[in-house]
Image: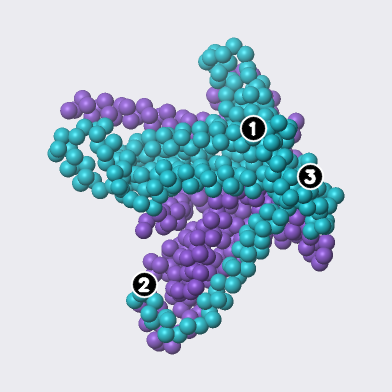
Chain colours: A purple, B cyan
Amino acid sequence: MKRKSQLQTLTRAFFLTLYTLFVVVPLYEMVKSSFEPLRDIESTQFHFLPLHFSWKAYRDMWTTLPLARYFIDSLVVSGISTLLSIVVAICAAYAFSRFRFPGKSFFGVMILATQIFPGMLFLLPIFVMFTQIQDNTGIQLNGTYLGLVITYMTFALPFAIWMMRGYFETIPLSLEEAAMIDGCSRIGVLTRIVIPLAIPGIIAVAVFAFLNAWNEVLFASVLTSDTTQTLAIGLQSYATQTVVEWNQLMASSITVTVPVMVAFLLVQKYFLFGLTGGVKE
Amino acid sequence: MHKYSWLEKKPNLIVLWMLLPALVLELLIHILPMLVGLYISFTHLTTFTLHDWLHAPFIGLENYKVGLNPSNPLGAAFFWSFFISLAYTAITVIASTLLGLGGALLVNHHFPGRAVFRTIFLLPYAMPVFVVGIVWRFMFMRDWGLVNQLLVNAFHVIASKPFWLIGPHAFIAIVIASIWRNWPFLFLISLAGLQTIPPDQYEAAEVDGANTLMKFRHITLPGLRPVISIGILLSFLWTFNDFTLPFSMLGENPSPSADVLTLHIYSNSFQDWNFGTGAAMSVLMMMALGLIILLFNRMFRLGRRNEL
């Protein structure tokens, strides 16, 4: 019996090592290269540790690429679309969790269904519609923040509403009833009781909406111009050029990744809650 | 019923006001574009007619005929690309499911450092997809990329360095990157599923003399089914619809071996400016997805639990 469990421990250790290597090797390569001079990266001599260590890439990347501007563009677009979608989603999710109304289940199914359609299906018509609006009203939607913000906030909505609704349903109705008997209005109930109690869920939803916008490439590649390019587009188009300062590209990739990675890891348990909220009956 | 009774005494307009913003946005950015897309797919819309798309020549099913005709170069490319997408997605999802389930079984026991491994395994999923694409592009560079360095310079597995990002190997490259990125999701799902299986089921089976394999076959797998089938479906849809990973690894014009449907439609629409055919292809893609979902539903009987 004891030998059997030792064997089990060894097998487990072996597989854990394999898994960890598979995950970590690309990450290690990314970090290592960001601290190397370009000629070491492009040398064919295999080296596990950096041959020469330098911070230079982290300094130079700000001038090789308009990285600061990409950052600002991404922050503005992701930040505003997240804020707006949260406000809209709170209202809709509250209505879903507390009221019965005609077409409720249809609306619910529809909201979820939009999740599974390919983005490509929407991109073309949205581009055509934005061009049309631009021609007729003069409101610039292609190549500005506005078009991207509207698109991202709408795309964040289905998941946000779905997840927040699950969250609101965990809040006992009796609290709200008591407040309403004391003369609190419906809006008062929402802002004073429901929202404060749902703050962790709201933060989690906000993080996911932000990450989606931060990481989005398809729409950004069509709906941005040279002056509104987001990080995703800026780095992606740089990566596919013929001459690339790979150490700087790795350094900027790390700079872009670390904040969102931390944010994701902090809220990942809510992610599963949001998904399985639909699985449990 | 009782849940709503105190509200129904006072029916009011507030519901409408709360739903209105979401409703309007969904209508304008989701529903209307779908209808417009459907309309465009029946027209000959190019860059010349773009600014007056309502008056673009209506050509009926012509775009669909072109797209579905395998003897026409456009149609042949579309079928090829559909096949590539299907293979890319299927391999990714199958491999990710096996890896994810294996990983979940590995950390589903209490041992020191368990939380650390769990977090490490999630890292690829916490990264922006475009960064995953950039990193794997970097790994697969021919002359000095790590993959070739390991294969040729370090371990001498093969004699000469293959091209990974162009030519027939590009398919392998995007599949590996896609598995690396996607398996943590199925890991997370499987782990959550494992935790819903009550431990006394295993204890009862042990009393009855079941071995590890029998326990896995008759308790673990059926117990996981409701959760993992949703996970498989979601990851299938996400991978099939994903544009970012192949795009950020290979750019707008991948070699035919890696010309997945999303990239194919994209370059058709925004490089060749054939919006009509692009829209028709998107509609066909959506219909194919619908079929796949139906099939999947048949296979896994989603929504129904433990009927085995």
Q: Amino acid at mark 1?
A: Trp
Instruction: Please give left or right for residue B298 compared with residue A2 in the image.
Output: right
Q: Name the residue: 43% across, 32% down.
A: A19
| Three-letter residue code for mark 3 | Trp
Residue B273 image label: 3
User: Between disc 1 and disc 3, whose residue precedes?
Assistant: 1
Name the secondary structure under disc 1: helix
Q: CA distance from mark 3 to mark 2?
A: 54 Å
- Of the residues tagged 3 and 2, which is closer to the observer? 3
Q: Is residue B134 visible?
A: no
Label annotation for residue A172: 2
Dot 2 falls on which chain?
A
User: Residue most toward the top?
Assistant: B159
Position in image of residue B171 (x %, y %): 60, 29
Which numbered circle lies on residue B80?
A: 1
Q: Chain of mark 3?
A: B
| Residues tagged 3 and 2 counted as in contact (Cβ below 8 A) | no
Residue furthest right as drawn:
B48
Quick check: A260 left or right of A44?
left
Q: Are marks 3 and 2 on the same chain?
A: no
**Mark 1 or 3, closer to the camera:** 1
A27 and A207: which one is in front? Answer: A207
Between marks 1 and 2 in the image, the one whose residue lies nearer the viewer: 1
Give the alpha-carbon distance from disc 1 to disc 2, as whole Å: 54 Å
Mark 1 touches mark 3? (CB < 8 Å)? no
Disc 2 marks a residue whose amino acid type is Pro
Q: Are marks 1 and 2 on the same chain?
A: no
Residue B252: quarter of image: top right
Callout 3 environment at 10 Å: few (<14), some (14 to 19), or many (20+)?
some
Name the chain letter of the residue that bears numbered label 1: B
Near mark 1 (Cα within 10 A), the count class, few <14, some 14-19 or many ≥20, is some
Tag 2, which secondary structure? loop
